[in-house]
Structure formats: C-alpha cells, structure tokens
Image (tube, rainbow, N blue to C red):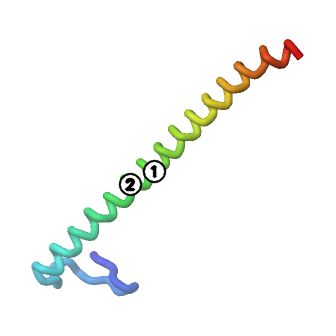
C-alpha cells in the first residue's frame, strides 16, 4: 500500500514508471536520513574540538594568572 496525498493506492495499480519513482523516493528518504545522522555527528565532533580548545586555553592561562 502506498499513500499519496492521504490517498492509499495498491502497488499493483501503479505503472512501472510510478513504481520506479516510489522506489527512488524511498532511496532519497534513506539518503536524507543518513545525511541528517552525518550532520549530527559532525556537529558533535565540532563541539568536542571546541571544548578541547577551551580546555587547552584554560590550562595555558592558569599558570600565567599565578604570576600576577
């Protein structure tokens, strides 16, 4: 069963071209999902590296403050 604009269609009623387009849409949906997962992983990696930079700055600043 395939739903288009809230109307259900039996896959057997679709033309071969329509079936191929449904399959392509499904492939694209998987790619979108994978892209979103990759985006989230990239965001997490950037946050991790930003935190490490802040950590390194705090370590390097603290000894200088002791000399004040």
* Residue linked to disc 1: 39
Find out whether the residues at labels 2 and 1 contact each other: C-beta distance under 8 Å.
yes
Extreme-front residue of the structure: 68
Q: Position of residue 10 (x, y in %)?
A: 23, 80
* Residue 54 vs residue 65, the one in the foreground: 65
Tell whether 62 sits left or right of 4.
right
Secondary structure state at the residue bearing disc 1: helix
Query: Residue placed at 12% from the left, 83% from the top?
Result: 15
Extreme-left residue of the structure: 16
Q: Position of residue 57 (x, y in %)?
A: 69, 26
Rounded to the nearest angstrom, the CA distance separating label 2 from label 1 is 6 Å
Whether 9 is drawn above or below 56: the answer is below
Secondary structure state at the residue bearing disc 2: helix
Whether 6 is drawn above or below 44: the answer is below
Residue 14 lies in quadrant: bottom left
Whether 24 is drawn above or below 11: the answer is above
* Residue 20 vs residue 65, the one in the foreground: 65
Residue 50 lies in quadrant: top right
Q: Which mark is residue 68?
A: none
Q: Quadrant of the C terminus?
A: top right
* Residue linked to disc 2: 35
Q: Position of residue 39 (x, y in %)?
A: 45, 50
Query: Residue placed at 40% from the left, 85% from the top?
Result: 6
Query: Residue placed at 56% from the left, 33% from the top?
Result: 49
């Amino acid at each position: 069963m395939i739903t288009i604009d809230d109307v259900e269609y039996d896959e057997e009623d679709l033309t071969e071209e329509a079936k191929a387009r449904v399959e392509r849409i499904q492939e694209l949906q998987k790619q979108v999902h994978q892209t979103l997962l990759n985006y989230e992983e990239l965001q997490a990696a950037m946050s991790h590296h930003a935190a490490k930079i802040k950590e390194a700055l705090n370590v390097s600043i603290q000894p200088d403050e002791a000399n004040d």
